Image: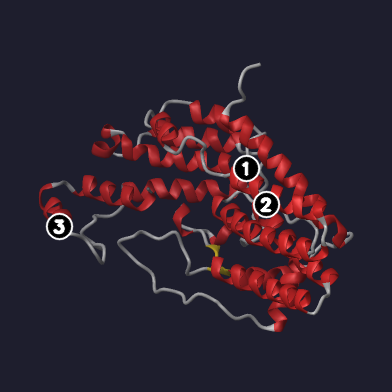
Amino acid sequence: MPSPSPESASAGQFRVLSGLLDSLVAPLGTAQTLDSARLSAFVALTGDTSLKRSWIAEPRTPVPPRTVVSSTELSLYRAWARSAPLPAFWGYRPGFGAPADMHQLPIRRHSVLTALRRANAADADSALARGDVSDALLRARENLAGARHLIDQPFAIDVMIGKAQIKESAKLLGRVARQANDPALAGAADRLQVLNESFSPLPPLGPAPLLRAARDPASDSLVRLALDTSMHPARRLQLAEMQVFGACFNPREMLFGVRAERRAGLGRLFVALGDIPRAGELEAAFRGTFDLADGESPRARPPRYRGLGEQLLEVVLPDGITARMRWCRRVA
């Protein structure tokens, strides 16, 4: 029998991981759809529009990590965790706030989600200390249910946060299983750890092969990959990012600007991604990223921080090349 491809193996690992998570959270009972008011409140709690994937040369003001949550916030977290499966991009406003480019999309605040999970886990450990195994198990299942909402999402950052949540929640589940003397539950916790480690939304061979394929703006190799609906949606959406990044590895485009073939290829990619709900809303943002490569003179608004070598290059390089050099630093 031929060995499975890295993509098909990853898809299989994710299906098994999802099935195990579903079985572990099923005892929570029938999940109810979270009403729009509470969902909006949770989006506001866990997201931050100032938290962008920003250019390293233009650092934002650091946001202190959250370590303490209120009882109201913890109740909201539990309601979110126990809710019915959430749609794609649940944590982002419809229309994504019309960002100028893909790196202005808001991301989740990992520290807030971590603080909420830890507060719930602390309640579980307190329950274990007083011998209340059933309450501790309930809290462990809630943390796993919350992670379940994240690992299905089409943004890799959400999936990676979900994986971190699963890792710690599986440890909590193991502690509960040991105190309950439940070998089956302990085995499920161990298996969850292994499956979580083996699955990743990132390319199994790293980004290098995809970037080599994206170097040719007329190539449809990424489009063919995007048509594989068995692949995790976050991995498929990353192919559109690779299409953008590929211009930075094409000398002709660095000299003369992003070619029309690359822009057309991005359009074909989003057609291939059309089965991912709301993915089409991102196309304008990705195209806006291309526009930055051919935008205003880089001397009009220089980066806050740049080394002596970059300043010297500005003296000898044409504006267009300098703009694209900075653009590649931003997108890559």
User: Is disc 3 placed on a helix, strand or loop?
Assistant: helix
Tell me the amino acid under the disc marked 3.
Gln
Q: CA distance from mark 1 to mark 3?
A: 40 Å
Of the numbered discs in the image, which one, if any, rests on residue 233? 1
Tell me the amino acid under the disc marked 1.
Pro
What residue sits 83% from the left and 57% below the top? 182
Q: CA distance from mark 2 to mark 3?
A: 43 Å
The residue pinned by badge 2 equals 88
Q: Is residue 61 left or right of residue 159?
A: left
Other residues around mark 1 within 10 Å, as few (<14) / some (14–19) / many (≥20): many
Of the two numbered discs 2 and 3 on the same chain, state the one appearing first in sequence: 2
Answer above or below: position of 323 versus 51.
above
What residue sits 79% from the left and 51% below the top? 22
What residue sits 28% from the left and 46% below the top? 324
What residue sits 65% from the left and 36% below the top? 11
Residue 44 percent coordinates (x, y): 62, 72
Task: Indicate which label's residue lies in the foreground, 1 or 3.
Answer: 1
Of the numbered discs in the image, which one, if any, rests on residue 213? none
Of the two numbered discs 2 and 1 on the same chain, state the one appearing first in sequence: 2
Which quadrant, please, contains the N terminus? top right
The residue pinned by badge 3 equals 311
User: Is disc 1 placed on a helix, strand or loop?
Assistant: helix
